[in-house]
Image (cartoon, coloured by chain):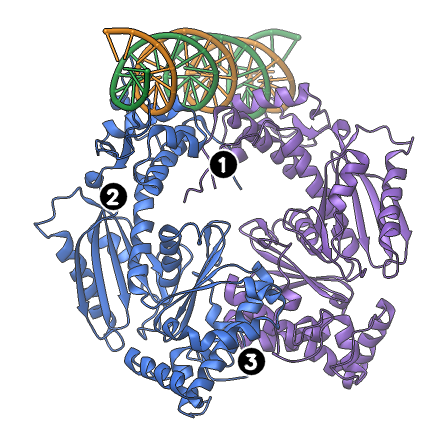
Chain colours: A purple, B blue, C green, D orange
DNA sequence: AGGCTTTTTTTCGAGCCTCAAAAAAATAGT
DNA sequence: ACTATTTTTTTGAGGCTCGAAAAAAAGCCT
């Protein structure tokens, strides 16, 4: 619902554009920024002068080795690390991790902690999260600019406004409004992000060549999650964090899923499903937790000999393949990153996956669909949270003046 | 990568916004436009003065019956019907239909024609399309402003740039670049649109209360098609027109689909699939064409007694339900419009559909998902094409990008 | 070293655009 | 006829971006 553009919005947006260009490019000169944004040199000059004066950017006197060029040397612009800081909180199964990141994106402090998420009562889970954040915020060694934003990532379903955890496999608790709790406790704007979405955000920053406009990040772990980027933007559902790829239906009425329904992709490809299948346990049996070490042993066994273990991975690949095929029928094929412990067993999964996808509408060019694997999801999630928080600071704090408008514009095609 | 906003873009965008507000609201006053766009009265006044002077808008002296209000009466602004015209071409099975529409959206001429699309050679199919368009363009009775845009709609897959038909069920021919052909022949900008996408566009204009930001239009006909609107914008794939809902996989390795693969939703819910199932023909049998009259008779029989016909509709509903369930797992539930001849039999489909959807992740609030039916797809497709073409004229011709506009219209003392 | 060339950055005036406030216009009520 | 009310237009001010020109900061050449 685009609303009319007001004159003062213009400068705000162009400020945000300049900051974004610097964050993306590292140390671009004013000329480079003018080229990427399409704005005139004079505009860039004026805006960057403002930003330097405000302490958001700084001129990097770094000796450029590119001394071969004639003419006045370019002056690189860099983000001022001390302009602000952000804090990330990643809550995963039995594990809580916090990091403080400066405005330039460097980790300046971190703390990790084990805790029994599956059995903790509500107050204690929330209390532990608050406590670890408080410890980091009050650390006297930290003399950064004040923390301007908190981004929390969690496995599970979040609401579409990035405010609350609605449901998570790591705890029986539901509907915890972490963003509001953090904001109330510390007076710092906070968001609650879905883990797979953050993985996708991180991939986009890590490898923008491969993960640019359209790609998929799939978490192969206890459950199956997905982060989806379409046309360069994170795709979320209208009400929830969306993209519940793991709960698309693979076989109507089929194997029992952790969500209580039957036939979901996850009920064939989640860790517990692979384990259940390999062990010859009934598809109707309740899902159980399987440790990462057990899964690695299972994969090793499957590589060693052709038995039920290998068959279990084959069935997982089939489920993922048909699921991806249906997904690709909707959005057209795109690069895929497989993340999580079972991504390390992707060699066992891939053949059946490709075979299945070739039988679907989305598999028309199935050879050209490329997969990448990354066994460790936690660094990705933290990185995604950090970038999410930093770009918020870029846009909402350092280029403010936005949407304090009542006029509720009608949407315009 | 989004580029900076230039100063001259600003006026262009706000012009487009004003035109769009008028098209949407019918006869809004300047005050109403100011309210919906969020721009100031003076800006609206200046822009609308320009637009009137250029003959794009006109002040409607229509006697407003709302004479009960005090104060200076509002002057409604309306689109000038003669400012431009657009032409729509809808090509469907054995049927070709063309209409000329004035800038205000009224049909001013139309022509329809039967032709055997399934057996026509390439040259003849293209030739017939060109001929009917030429007849309309050369009609001497038409003294409208010149036709500024052609929008062609077709059942099947189009490319994501709206230039070419890639594949269609109505002809064995593939990869016909209709947009380029029309542009070369007539020198008028043209696009090639997917039928279901146009249905969705039309619904958005017809009933913006129900079909606003997120909704789904599903064509239940020979094949199963979908038009998807997310966050107010038509969703298309990255390469094709996208949204091949009918070819999501319902049962891996299942019934034979018209696309040659197995287990697609369409292979259970397309007209030919319902017919095949009701007649006791094998699921492996090649799809056959079934006439609308036959389908209506089938539905009547199914309503009359509980036999294989009713079961066929039940199975169709099940396939649609699981398919929607998987879709809703990705995008969250949204209102659905069922369009096409089998939408008239939705009473037979709905119970099994709801039962299936309730077994999926997307069906958590399955009662609240609402369906609407519209048996006739052709008017919708034409309407969608017309609106698509008109909004193009609004944005690209009457609010153009470059500085192709001299100050001829501006003379403020 | 000194002057010349090249490239980057800043400065300055001009042109637009939007906004807020004031003025003008049109009508209902008294 | 006069006042009150609401809408529309006009006007002046301020801000933004742009292009051109000037200034700055090197390397290159004699």
Residue A85 horizontal/vertical position (percent): 77, 33
Q: Residues within 10 Å of mark 3 (few under 14, many from 20)?
A: many
Q: Residues within 10 Å of mark 2 (few under 14, many from 20)?
A: some
Residue denoted by label 2? B104
- Examine the rendered structure and indicate whether residue A79 appears above or below residue B186: above
Name the disc covering residue A370, or none: none
- Helix, strand or loop at label 2? It is loop
Alpha carbon separation for disc pair 1 and 3: 45 Å
Alpha carbon separation for disc pair 3 and 2: 47 Å
Q: Nearer the viewer, mark 1 or mark 3?
A: 1
Q: Residue at x 73, y 82 (%)?
A: A283
- Examine the rendered structure and indicate whether residue B340 appears above or below residue B84: below
Image-based side of B284 in relation to A262, left or right: left
Residue denoted by label 3? B251
- Examine the rendered structure and indicate whether residue A333 appears above or below residue A378: below
Residue denoted by label 1? A408
Q: Nearer the viewer, mark 3 or mark 2?
A: 2
Residue B269 horizontal/vertical position (percent): 45, 77
Residue A367 visible in image: no
Residue A135 visible in image: yes
């Amino acid at each position: 619902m685009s609303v009319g553009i007001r004159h003062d919005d213009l400068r705000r947006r162009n400020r945000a554009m300049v900051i974004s260009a610097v964050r993306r490019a590292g140390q671009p000169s004013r000329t480079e920024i003018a080229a990427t944004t399409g704005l005139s040199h004079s505009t860039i000059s004026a805006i960057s002068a403002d930003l330097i004066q405000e302490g958001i950017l700084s001129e990097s006197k770094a000796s450029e080795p590119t001394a071969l060029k004639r003419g006045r040397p370019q002056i690189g612009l860099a983000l001022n690390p001390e302009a602000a800081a952000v804090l990330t909180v990643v809550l995963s199964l039995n594990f809580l991790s916090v990091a403080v990141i400066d405005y330039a994106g460097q980790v300046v402090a971190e703390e990790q902690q084990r805790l029994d998420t599956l059995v903790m009562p509500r107050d204690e889970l929330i209390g532990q999260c608050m406590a670890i954040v408080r410890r980091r915020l009050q650390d006297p060694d930290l003399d950064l600019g004040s923390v301007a934003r908190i981004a929390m990532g969690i496995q599970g379903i979040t609401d579409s406004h990035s405010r609350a955890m609605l449901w998570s496999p790591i705890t029986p608790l539901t509907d915890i409004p972490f963003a509001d709790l953090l904001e109330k406790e510390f007076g710092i704007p906070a968001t609650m992000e879905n883990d797979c979405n953050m993985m996708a955000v991180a991939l986009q920053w890590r490898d923008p060549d491969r993960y640019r406009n359209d790609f998929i990040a799939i978490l192969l772990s206890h459950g199956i999650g997905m982060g989806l980027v379409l046309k360069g933007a994170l795709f979320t559902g209208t009400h929830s964090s969306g993209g519940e790829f793991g709960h698309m239906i693979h076989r109507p009425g089929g194997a029992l899923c952790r969500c209580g329904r039957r036939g979901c992709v996850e009920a064939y490809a989640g860790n517990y499903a692979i384990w259940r299948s390999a062990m010859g346990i009934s598809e109707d049996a309740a899902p159980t937790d399987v440790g990462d070490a057990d899964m690695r042993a299972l994969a090793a066994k499957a590589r060693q000999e052709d038995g039920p273990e290998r068959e279990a991975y084959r069935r997982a690949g089939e489920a993922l393949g048909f699921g991806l095929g249906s997904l690709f029928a909707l959005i057209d094929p795109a690069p895929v990153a497989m993340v999580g412990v079972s991504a390390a067993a992707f060699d066992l999964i891939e053949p059946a996956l490709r075979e299945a996808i070739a039988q679907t509408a989305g598999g028309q060019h199935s050879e050209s669909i490329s997969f990448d694997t990354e066994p460790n999801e936690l660094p990705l999630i933290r990185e995604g949270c950090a970038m999410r928080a930093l770009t918020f600071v870029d846009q909402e704090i350092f280029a403010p003046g936005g949407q304090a408008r009542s006029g509720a514009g009608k949407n315009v095609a």
